[in-house]
Amino acid sequence: MAQGLAINGLSKSFGGLQVAQNLNVSLPPGSRTALIGPNGAGKTTFANLITGVLQPTSGSILLDGKDIGNLSEAGRVRAGIAKTFQITNLFRDLTVRENLRLPILERKGLSSSIFSRADGRPGVEDEIDQLLRSFNLSPLADRQVRSLAYGHQRLVELALTLALKPKILILDEPAAGVPSTESHLIVEAIKRLPSDLSVLIIEHDMQLVFEVADRIIVLVSGAVLIEGTAEEVTADLRVRRLYLGGVHG
Amino acid sequence: MTDLVTPRVSTRRAIPLFGSLWPIAIVILAAFAAFFLFPYDLAFLTRIVIMMVFVLSFDLILGYAGIATLGHAAMYGCGAYAAGLFALHISPDPLVGLLIGATAGALIGWASGLVLLRTHGMTLLIISIAVTMVLQEAASKARWLTGGADGLPGISVSPILGFFEFDFVGQVAFIYSVCVLVAVLVLCHVLVSSPFGLALRGIKNSASRMRAIGTPVYRRKVTVYTIAGAIAGIAGALAAQVTGLVGLEVFNFSLSADVMVMLILGGAGRLYGALIGTLIFMTVHHVAASIDPFNWLFVIGFMLLVVVFALPDGLVSLPARLVRFLRRA
């Protein structure tokens, strides 16, 4: 039985513009895969196709052998696919604790409950405390998210996504906009992610990619140019010419 | 990170369902005081209380879920007509009448919400106005049922619980309305403190993030719109029972606009802001209109400008602001 995420022949076009061309990608459990490519290569579109924000023109998406292509965005989250956004997307008026409470309540199927309180549920609050400790966010638990430094907001977003206990985690430019003084927080957090979780990192920061990814996919004009280890990718002349400009390798 | 999988055994205690209800006790005390301090203004005070119920329902959708509409009068109007027709043709029981009003409000909220809530922003505003206009026109044309432009006159209800008959001074009507307000306030308090209430705040903050954590955003919105419709229907039914009349003005655009102004004035998303905003708006309206019947809107407009610029979170945030200012001083 197939394990993890398997994407077969995935294509997407908007009229005459083809933004994803016959993509075949697999994300086995525990893998750390980076998706790189120049601006407009179709990286975020690819993430949106996996998460159900966009529907593919053709192709299939299998999660642990089951076709999830017909599931809605919310259905795919319940199936085990979660993502962070390119630009931090949090509940800015809520506290860090409330931000983490929401996905846990949702995952446990409690978010539609009306005649019970949202706070003070022992199982939920303990899980929140665990997440806060894991990301060193405990001192900020009761602060409104809008008042946090951007690096900390990125950590909250990562913690919020992990609260869903996903099988596949898509990180869309996790270090984008984070000052260099805070980027180590993100790298450390990614390195400490659960070992059985499949992670797809879409990133421009090559240093971060080389530090955390064990496999790299280079996407150009919606098609895979090359897939391999960091050494294989940096040694490829097309990549050096098109993307890295000969800096690495 | 591995400790995520094995949470420790909890030592927390669950917080009671109703949590802290002392602000509701203050509302009851304030109503009690008003009853004795203004015995000759009970009809006006009853109108304020009914409007508070209506604004509370709007707070659920605008203040908590972030759904901005200008057609909230649709649910209020349907509740008023349903309760009026029920009292005239079926049963004069006021409590069953409230239930009928709530059902009518909920039904129109659900049916219109299914369409409205697929849209956003300006489209949503315009369609919500259109729904109310269609209902007003339908009520105007269906003279055989609604009385058309003449409205539904002569609505009378039986004594509440078989004992408390509506009196000429309006004491029973006031107490009855306050009881309904308190019940609605408790219900709203429970709702906004619940996981569903938290989900609404999440939707208001970021609907896309809510979708990304697996929340069926549209379904949640339709649910809260239906609940708010039921509460608005209760307000409409209460108005029909207390005044004994329902007219086409229950669907007026100005009613929906006034409700929005009252909520913004008091502070959206805080429940008690709805009460304060309604009290201030209606009192200023009453006093200013008695001094200058033609230019009273100037006072309301000026007040709204001051609040929007100086207190963006509404009048309900004034005490906290003052405390912060005094601490700094």
Image (cartoon, coloured by chain):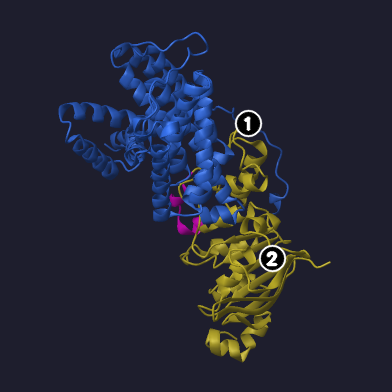
Residue at image x 46%, y 19%?
B179
Which sits in the foreground, B314 or A36?
B314
Q: Quadrant of residue B237?
A: top left
Chain drawn in yellow: A
Image-quadrant location for residue A232 = bottom right
Q: Position of residue B111 (x, y in %)?
A: 53, 44
Query: Could you tell whether B186 is left or right of A195 in the image?
Result: left
Q: How many marks?
A: 2
Which quadrant is home to the N terminus of chain B?
bottom right
Q: Secondary structure beneath disc 1?
A: loop
Whether pointer 1 and pointer 2 mark residues with C-beta atoms closer than 8 Å, the reply is no
Helix, strand or loop for the magenta stretch, by majority: helix
* Residue at the top extreme of this rendering: B163
Q: Which residues are magenta?
A: A143-153
User: What is the drawing colour of chain B?
Assistant: blue
The amino acid type of the residue labelled 1 equals: Ala
Find residue B160 and report its horizontal and vertical position in percent.
49, 14
- Is residue B173 rendered to the left or right of residue B281? right
Amino acid bearing label 2:
Gly
Q: Is residue A102 above or below residue B227?
A: below
Where does the C terminus of chain B fall, quadrant-wise?
A: top left
Residue named by callout 2: A69
Seen in the picture, residue B168 relative to B103 is either above or below; the reply is above
Residue ID for mark 1:
B14
